[in-house]
Amino acid sequence: MNAHRNRLPYWLTAPGMLVTLAFVALPLVLLFSLSLYPFVSGVGIGEQMTFANYTEIFSDDYFHAIFARTFGMAILVTLLCIVIGVPEAYVLTRLSERWRAVSVVIVLGPLLISVVIRTLGWAVLLGNEGVINNLLMASGLVSEPVKIMFTFTGVVIAMVHVLVPFMVLAVWTSLQKLDPATEQAAQSLGASLPTVLRRIVFPQVIPGVLSGGLIVFALAASAFATPAIIGGRRLKVVPTTIYDEFLGNLNWPLGAALAVVLVLIVLAVSMGVNRLVERRWKQVFQ
Amino acid sequence: MSFLELQGLSKRFDDFTAVNDCSLSVAKGEFVCLLGPSGCGKTTTLQMVAGFVSPSQGRIVLDGKDITGVKPDKRGLGIVFQSYALFPHMTVTANVAFGLEMRGVPAAERRRRVGETLELVHLESLTDRYPRELSGGQRQRVAMARALVIQPPVLLLDEPMGALDAKLREEMQIELRALQHRVGITTIMVTHDQAEAMTLADRVVLMNQGRIEQVGRPFDMYEQPNGRFSSTFLGKANVFSGQALGGMVHVEGHRLPCADQAATGRVDYIVRPEKVEITRESALVRGRISARVFLGNHWLFQVDTTLGTMQITHANTGLPQAGEGDEVGLRWSGEHARVVPTGAST
């Protein structure tokens, strides 16, 4: 009887585990093994197993620049999402019930629209003949269009817009666990509102900032549509490079190797940051 | 001389009046308890004094200065919250030092004052702990220390014992009382527990439905409740509606004695359970004991009489003569009965 009951959880999780194994773990393993074969032009995938693809990635400045751009962008997007998302979530919790319902729809609305469509919307806004530049020109603030489309800045703006809802949701969850009396206590002890937010509220929502940050970072580092549309062909990031290797150059092994490196770096950074933050603020992670 | 004064304080929310025209003056060093059932407006009153809720009407005057419009961070009052509201990400020391830090007190003096205050609440050995690592009683002490360290003119306590279990609560009550005497700080405490209010307060402010029902020293208030609500909220009471005439109150055909010769008209006749005697001889009313319950230091009887069910308590001096089902007489002295005009309050 007892042994039976102890095994039940395993049986219940088995279907999910099998699906995960079949559709996530297995493709990853296959991807990894693919990355270990050479690419022979004219033939395709070679026979002899090799680390040549990895050597190429680690020694070629071209790839270094792409990786640096990808992770620089992911880090910047994550920081901006924290700066925008945390206050946004705080304001949300402070609204009256009716306004909160409206605001949540506005905040989460972007998630209901396809990334491609949203990004094309940004392209309309950001282009040289776009809405923003037309306004700037018309108001006489600039004499020439400001180049935003096909720039790092443009990609970051569009990505932040796409990803900020994830941060808001994560921080909001954390804020709901916060005892509002701690804010009042700090106030009664003489703290102004900015001090209360910085010293009392923010440290208590670190778990939310962390989980939101990890989601945003992982999504930003692996984003494809936004960098492809806003960044264009020349402003390459790792996901668009992988795409080009697979479908442009037909160099599947190199594409697979790039994908493996991307996954590993995202994993390493996420786990490292998670560890660090949980240790530094261990009191707010019960 | 009044140190803190609430003048005609009211708070209306959209469709409901939480506090209605409350006036109260508190002397320096006094311990005042706002007592009442939940929803009576006591917490809202405290929140208005703290500055977290702005009154719809009325003024709050502290030491001669009108502080009604002053923001909570500028009032400088010490507040202990029901949940204690300790900062979970800070150590005990950092929690207590926070208020001093906000006041720009230099580090050396900060350390000294935090040390002194923690000693005052007997927490000097737990300075580096985090709130999560403390027991309920210890958390409460940290909250007290954090409020006291800034040397506030007034200490506000919002149900400070609410989160403690019964035994610890009694200990902390005695300790809080001693601490308040030692520091000599003017204190306002909110509670729904009448025993707690009686234990701690110099004066009890009894509130009901947004209004102050009665203000007085615990003993006076218990002995001289000014109405049905006061008598039943503060302790137990048998209350009958009757007609007063010439030193007697007529209730359901009974003539009950009262000390107040001048009382006339519709009155509430109040007699405390411990003032009623069970007798086999001449009695004011007769009835049958429907329940007898042993409560340790006293016995509780329920007696069905023609006046209604009466509660009677007797100190436990041995097994009582009367048991369940017995027909008994009840009597009490007119001195111990309290007569107030019906609807005098509320």
Image: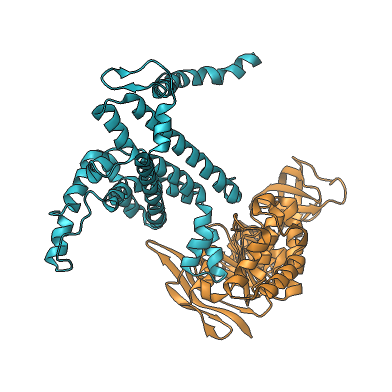
Chain colours: A cyan, B orange
Return the residue nearer the eye: B345 or A103: A103
Query: Where does residue B343 sit, x and y in percent of width and height?
Result: 53, 66
Return the residue nearer the eye: A6 or B276: A6
> Which quadrant of the structure image shows residue B33?
bottom right
Asked whether residue B336 is in view, the answer is no
Query: Where does residue B30 sit, x and y in percent of width and height?
Result: 68, 76
Q: Is residue B128 above or below residue A223?
A: below
- Residue occupying image coordinates x 17% and y 52%: A127
- Residue occupying image coordinates x 18% and y 58%: A132
- Residue occupying image coordinates x 69% and y 74%: B108
Q: Is residue B115 above or below residue A6?
A: below
Asked whether residue B12 is in view, the answer is yes
Say whether residue A112 is left or right of residue A33.
Answer: left
Query: Where does residue B157 sit, x and y in percent of width and height?
Result: 62, 65
Return the residue nearer the eye: B116 or A27: A27
Say whether residue B307 is left or right of residue B322.
Answer: left
Query: Where does residue B142 sit, x and y in percent of width and height?
Result: 68, 61
